[in-house]
Amino acid sequence: MTKPVVLESVAALRQWREAQRKAGHRVGLVPTMGALHAGHISLVTGVKQVTDKAVVSIFVNPTQFAPTEDFSKYPRTFESDLHLLSEVRAEAVFAPQVAEMYPQGFATTVSLDGPAKVELEDKFRPTHFSGVATVVSKLLLQAMPDVAIFGEKDFQQLAVIRHMARDLDIPVEIMGGPTLREADGLAMSSRNVYLTVGERMVAPIVHRTLQAAAEIVRRGMPLAVIEAEAADRLTKAGLVVDYVAIRDALSLAVPMECAAPASLRILVAASLGQTRLIDNIAV
Ligand code: AMP
């Protein structure tokens, strides 16, 4: 098992990337915040199927956390991350310090509309996507990958990044990867380590509720009723619901019920104790 080469500076990343280009290799980028689990690893496997060399970025990006959020206590497990990435034969890890990504005087952000302004995550984390889009555009420009892969777990994020790459003509193919789940349906997340034993037993209700809601949508009940009932079920189980929303899977807009059947997605965000869970499912 060979460990991936660890690149800590943009200069080192660019040098590595240039060597791949000269060797004729296609490069896949997997942006992460570390604390890797099987969901992240599935993205590495996915991108390796369509490229020759995978570079995984590990960077807990401060600009996507609000001051009230968990930036300082976000799990950091670099050595075990490297071990997992060796097993799946990732070729490189880009792990910059904050000062490398945001040097003194940094003053530029990406401003978003479209799927970033649909009253889902953006309503509850109003500064989040601007931080995500800024760091992802930096990573794309630094690594110049042929393909970059993002999880459907963060469905709105995937839509925002696809839109941004298109609007800014960033020459990269954005690929989505399916959500990996625990055996009981809970979507894998680095934040699941925050759950207490009791909360961990309750948490799979999020996926069960999504599955039940998708089934009822297929049977043709009014969407607002299904959303309200799903939110009620989660509230009764002890979660504090930010939203349960049935949306157009492409635009994330509220679907017109009288229009021709569109491809729909059900998205949920709810807190269980101190842990905010997000998940989504196709209808
Ligand atoms: P994060 O480290 O949480 O920023 O996530 C890095 C990437 O992994 C993002 O593209 C996420 O959407 C993706 N991801 C997170 N959890 C999962 C999961 N359970 N299955 C598949 N991809 C995931």
Image (cartoon, rainbow, N blue to C red):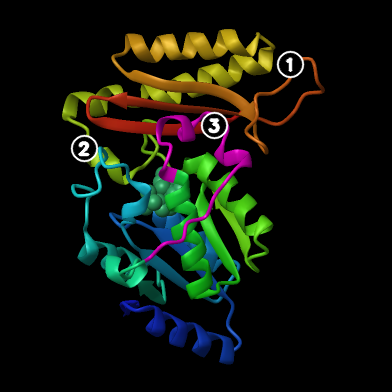
Which residue shows up at 60% across the image and 67% down it? Answer: 50
Q: In what quadrant of the picture does the C terminus appear?
A: top right
Q: Amino acid under label 2?
A: Tyr
Kindly report the distance in space between the C-alpha atoms of the residues bearing marks 3 and 1: 19 Å
The answer to whether any part of residue 100 appears in the image is yes
Vertically, is 221 above or below 185?
Answer: above
Vertically, is 130 above or below 221?
Answer: below
Whether residue 199 sits left or right of residue 129 in the image: it is left
Asked whether the residues under the numbered discs 3 and 1 touch, taking CB atoms below 8 Å apart as contact, a structural biologist would say no
Among numbered discs 1 and 2, the one appearing first in the sequence: 2
Number of numbered labels in the structure image = 3
Q: Which residue is mark 3?
A: 281
Q: Which residue is mark 1?
A: 257
Q: Nearer the viewer, residue 180 or 94?
A: 94
User: Which portion, as a residue range, is magenta?
Assistant: 106-128
Among numbered discs 2 and 3, the one appearing first in the sequence: 2
**In this rendering, the label closer to the viewer, 2 or 3:** 2
Q: Amino acid under label 3?
A: Ile
The answer to whether the residue bearing label 2 lies less than 8 angstroms from the nearest atom of ligand 1 is no
Label 2 crowding class (10 Å Cα cut-off): few <14, some 14-19, many 20+?
A: some
In what element is the residue under mark 2?
A: helix
Which residue shows up at 54% across the image and 17% down it? Answer: 213
The label shown at residue 194 is: 2
Q: Is residue 20 magenta?
A: no
Whether residue 219 sits left or right of residue 270 in the image: it is right
